[in-house]
Image: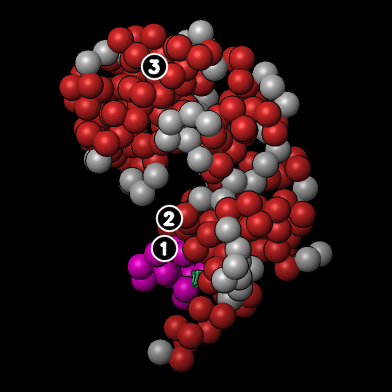
Amino acid sequence: MSEIRNIASVISGQYESDGGWGKYAPFEVLVNIMLSQSTHWRNVDAAMERFVRKFRGIDDVARADLAEIEKAIRPAGFYRVRAARISRLARSLQKNHGGRLEGITELPYAEAKKELTSLEGIGPKTADVFLMAVRGERVLPVDVHIFRIMKRLGVAKGGDGYESLRAKLEKEIPPGERARVHLALIEFGRQICKSQNPRCEECPIRKHCREGDKTDRG
Ligand code: SF4
């Protein structure tokens, strides 16, 4: 078994998450992913609860005043910039896609990703997480936690960007396990391999990690 596969197997055996997307419609999943960037999940959940209570789909958001969107998502932070982005996204989906995401989610992966990344505020990671969440696309999106962990483990090298690290991980992790590994790595990053003060003494993959060795040496 390769080192990456070994690490993924240990982490996915010990950390679990379902992503929490099951309760949301596709547009809400997209908003949820957009709000999750650099934001604690508790604040995202609080913002999503208000957003879902307030708005009934893409058309409703497209029609709304910016102030209403800002008020709904305020707990997530950066609410002015984010509300403007969500508003422009809803308007663009209304204008160019009939207010529906299904026209995009039913496309083959490469085309769906191309369409998504042409929309306001949606980059490759958001597109991949979205497709994984709403239709079980067998990708392994690399978020900020996964990037940090892989860098510490020496898997991500200096020249690696989003797509090259994703390809590296997907080469080792079988398609059916990617979503689980993605979510488990994020959970591991939140609980143990945190950006500040990682808890290396409790880390189940410490023997694979050069950063963990450094903490030993003080
Ligand atoms: S040993 Fe520390 S730095 Fe390395 S993966 Fe574990 S928690 Fe992260």
Q: Which region is colored magenta?
A: 192-203
Nearer the observer, 148 or 186 = 148
Name above or below for residue 165 compared with residue 81: below
Specify how the rendered protein is coloured.
Answer: secondary structure
Alpha carbon distance from label 2 to label 3: 34 Å
Q: Disc 3 beta carbon < 8 A from ligand 1?
A: no
Q: Is residue 201 magenta?
A: yes
Alpha carbon distance from label 3 to label 1: 37 Å
Helix, strand or loop at mark 1 = loop
Alpha carbon distance from label 1 to label 2: 6 Å
What amino acid type is highlighted by mark number 2?
Arg
Q: Characterize the magenta stretch by its predominant secondary structure.
A: loop
Residue at (64% x, 68% y) in the render: 155
Q: Position of residue 35 (x, y in %)?
A: 36, 37
Answer with mark 3 or mark 1, whichever residue precedes in sequence: 3
Residue corresponding to mark 2: 190
Q: Decide: marks 1, 2 in contact (CB < 8 A)?
A: yes
Q: Single out the mark in the foreground, 3 or 1.
A: 3
Q: Disc 1 beta carbon < 8 A from ligand 1?
A: yes
- 74 horizontally vs 212: left or right: left
